[in-house]
Image: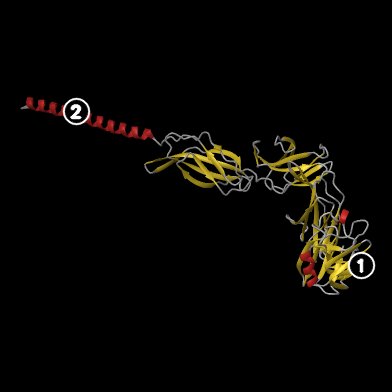
């Protein structure tokens, strides 16, 4: 019995020893597995590379970057470094490797922040951010004008609020082969004077604004160009007014092929109304309102390219009178320089016609304020060596009057300088008939 008990106890001890060893092994295996899971840790998120700007607009920035292996997406934020340095606005997440950001201010320094992220088990793991310091392009230069076109050419433009400075380029003629002639620092230094010019020569100037960042990078606007001619300077014109019209005269510019005349009720208006053009050195406007107006006369060169010169601005109050006399609302108006006649009835033009007045320099039509003092139909006009039958006759000054001239085939222009009348106003038939039927003795006739 004792012998059996010893054997049993030995066997039981062996079993317990094996069980104990299995328990230790199992616990070790479980602990090893848990340690392996713990050793895996958070996922590694790679950094962005190749971050760059790919736009040249003034109100938006588009950035691109290289893909990051294993990334679930990318987070983008932007900082307006001029307005709120250090403050970033979240632009959202994207699975693309690019993003466009719109609605930005022009010429502004921005810092773009981009990082990759990984989503795992419902958790988000962000990588280290990468930063790009850049800027929107400045707006295109506006308001570029010539302010001097003599032996010095000066151009001026509107101030751009967000630039560091400007670059001025010049090309001979309109070749487009521009060379940098001046770099200007300071946004309010918005003009350039070029003294290295030759009279009568065309130059084209291009102005570009730029924003320079602290890192030295520059961001440029699109260029704005203007053609100028040295010597195409502003005429110093004389100006006067009578009978709702404005008369202008000036000396000829050696390089101008014509002159354009403009006016405005606002001296500082950006756009004036064009009154007309002439190749001569004087101009009479059409009928204008009786108020203060501002006038400019621009010399124009027209060749392979059209170039506008510079202009002075002069003011005048448009007069409703002539020789300090009012004419009322029904009258005849005759312009010798324009070789034209108008009939106003109750303030409205009912006749506008070319005419031929007295031969210039020898039998000039008298100028001044007159009235029709006699009218006749189917009469004959007599003078030294001639007798001319006419259908309509209206006398206004001595032997001078308005009448038809069947012997003429054309009217207006420069005919009066070499083949004018004996002082009368020769008028096309239909026009003189209308004038005759709408005037009476006493109707004013104004000649200038």
In which quadrant is the N terminus drawn? top left
Q: Nearer the viewer, residue 180 or 281?
A: 281
Question: What residue is pinned by disc 2?
Answer: 18
Question: Which residue is located at x 77 percent, y 55 percent?
Answer: 276
- Height in image: 3 above or below 363? above
- Height in image: 11 above or below 128? above
Q: Which x, y percent locates residue 172?
A: 75, 36
Q: Which x, y percent locates residue 191?
A: 76, 44
Q: Quadrant of residue 32?
A: top left
**Dot 1: element:** loop
Residue 21 is tagged as: none
Question: What residue is pinned by disc 1?
Answer: 399
How many neighbours does mark 1 have within 10 angstroms: few (below 14), some (14-19), or many (20 or more)? Answer: few
Q: Nearer the viewer, residue 215 or 232?
A: 232
Q: Nearer the viewer, residue 124 or 63?
A: 63
Between the C-alphas of marks 1 and 2, the distance is: 153 Å
How many neighbours does mark 2 have within 10 angstroms: few (below 14), some (14-19), or many (20 or more)? Answer: few
**Dot 2: element:** helix
Direction from residue 87 to residue 187 in the image, left or right: right
Q: Which x, y percent locates residue 206?
A: 71, 40
Q: Quadrant of residue 95?
A: top left
Direction from residue 321 to residue 126 in the image, left or right: left
Q: Quadrant of residue 227?
A: top right
Q: How is the image coloured?
A: secondary structure
In which quadrant is the C terminus drawn? bottom right
- Height in image: 334 above or below 328? above
Q: Nearer the viewer, residue 359 or 346?
A: 359
Question: Which residue is located at x 23 percent, y 32 percent?
Answer: 23
């Amino acid at each position: 019995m004792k012998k059996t008990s010893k054997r049993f106890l030995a066997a039981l001890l062996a079993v317990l020893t094996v069980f104990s060893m299995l328990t230790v092994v199992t616990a070790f295996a479980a602990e090893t597995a848990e340690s392996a899971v713990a050793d895996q840790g958070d996922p590694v998120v790679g950094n962005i590379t190749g971050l760059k700007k790919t736009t040249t607009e003034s109100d938006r920035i588009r950035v691109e970057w290289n893909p990051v292996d294993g990334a679930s997406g990318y987070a983008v934020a932007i900082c307006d470094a001029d307005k709120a340095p250090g403050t970033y606005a979240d632009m959202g997440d994207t699975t693309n490797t690019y993003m466009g950001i719109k609605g930005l201010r022009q010429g502004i320094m921005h810092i773009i922040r981009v990082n990759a992220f990984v989503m795992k088990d419902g958790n988000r793991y962000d990588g280290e951010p990468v930063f790009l310091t850049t800027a929107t392009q400045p707006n295109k230069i506006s308001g570029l004008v010539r302010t001097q076109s003599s032996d010095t050419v000066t151009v001026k433009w509107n101030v751009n609020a967000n630039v560091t400075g400007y670059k001025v380029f010049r090309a001979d003629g309109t070749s487009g082969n521009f060379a940098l002639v001046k770099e200007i620092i300071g946004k309010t230094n918005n003009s350039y004077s070029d003294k290295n010019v030759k009279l009568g020569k065309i130059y084209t100037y291009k102005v570009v604004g730029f924003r320079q960042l602290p890192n030295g990078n520059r961001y440029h606007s699109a260029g704005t160009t203007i053609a100028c001619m040295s010597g195409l300077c502003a005429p110093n014109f004389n100006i006067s007014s009578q009978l709702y019209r404005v008369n202008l005269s000036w000396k000829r510019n050696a390089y101008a092929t014509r002159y354009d005349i403009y006016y405005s009720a606002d001296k500082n208006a950006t756009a004036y109304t064009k009154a007309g053009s002439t190749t001569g050195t004087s101009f009479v406007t059409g009928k204008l309102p009786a108020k203060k107006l501002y006038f400019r006369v621009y010399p124009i060169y027209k060749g392979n390219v059209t170039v506008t010169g510079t202009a002075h601005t002069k003011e005048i109050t448009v007069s409703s009178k002539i020789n300090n006399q009012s004419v009322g609302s029904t009258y005849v108006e005759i312009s010798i320089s324009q070789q034209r006649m108008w009939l106003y009835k109750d303030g409205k033009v009912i006749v506008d016609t070319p005419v031929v007045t007295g031969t210039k320099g020898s039998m000039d039509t008298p100028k001044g304020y007159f009235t029709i003092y006699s009218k006749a139909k189917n009469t004959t006009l007599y003078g030294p060596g001639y007798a001319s039958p006419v259908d309509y006759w209206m006398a206004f000054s001595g032997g001078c009057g308005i009448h038809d001239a069947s012997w003429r085939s054309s009217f207006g222009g420069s005919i009066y300088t070499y083949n004018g009348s004996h002082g009368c106003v020769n008028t096309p038939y239909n026009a003189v008939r209308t004038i005759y039927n709408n005037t009476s003795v006493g109707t004013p006739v104004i000649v200038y």
